Amino acid sequence: MDVKYDLTSYVRVLKLASTPAWGEFSQVAKIAGAGIFLVGFLGFVIFAVMSFLPGGV
């Protein structure tokens, strides 16, 4: 493991990275929020279905 080479690679990536504009950040946040909501809703639906089955939760 070449630590000096690894650090150089990390620094190069950080120099290329930039702070997103507000519009881009907002769009990514909305998509991530929608994904979290969908996963939670799907979990709730599975829980509700399992509750009505015999021997359920």
Image (spheres, rainbow, N blue to C red):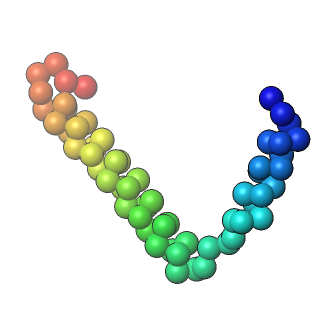
Q: Is residue 27 left or right of residue 18?
A: left
Q: Is residue 54 left or right of residue 33?
A: left
Q: In this view of the protein, which residue sits in the foreground, 14 or 21?
A: 14
Q: Residue at x 32, y 53 (%)?
A: 38
Residue 55 picture location, percent across and down: 16, 19
Q: In this view of the protein, which residue sits in the foreground, 52 or 17?
A: 17
Q: Residue at x 30, y 41 (%)?
A: 43
Residue 57 lies, with reference to residue 31, above or below; the image says: above
Total residue callouts: 0
Q: Residue at x 45, y 59 (%)?
A: 32
Q: Give the residue at the far top of this rendering.
A: 55
Residue 40 picture location, percent across and down: 35, 48
Residue 41 picture location, percent across and down: 29, 50
Residue 44 lies, with reference to residue 23, above or below; the image says: above
Quadrant in which the C terminus is drawn: top left
Q: Residue at x 40, y 53 (%)?
A: 36
Residue 12 quadrant: bottom right
Q: Is residue 49 left or right of residue 6?
A: left
Residue 6 picture location, percent across and down: 80, 42
Q: Is residue 20 left or right of residue 41?
A: right
Quadrant in which the N terminus is drawn: top right
Residue 14 lies, with reference to residue 40, above or below; the image says: below
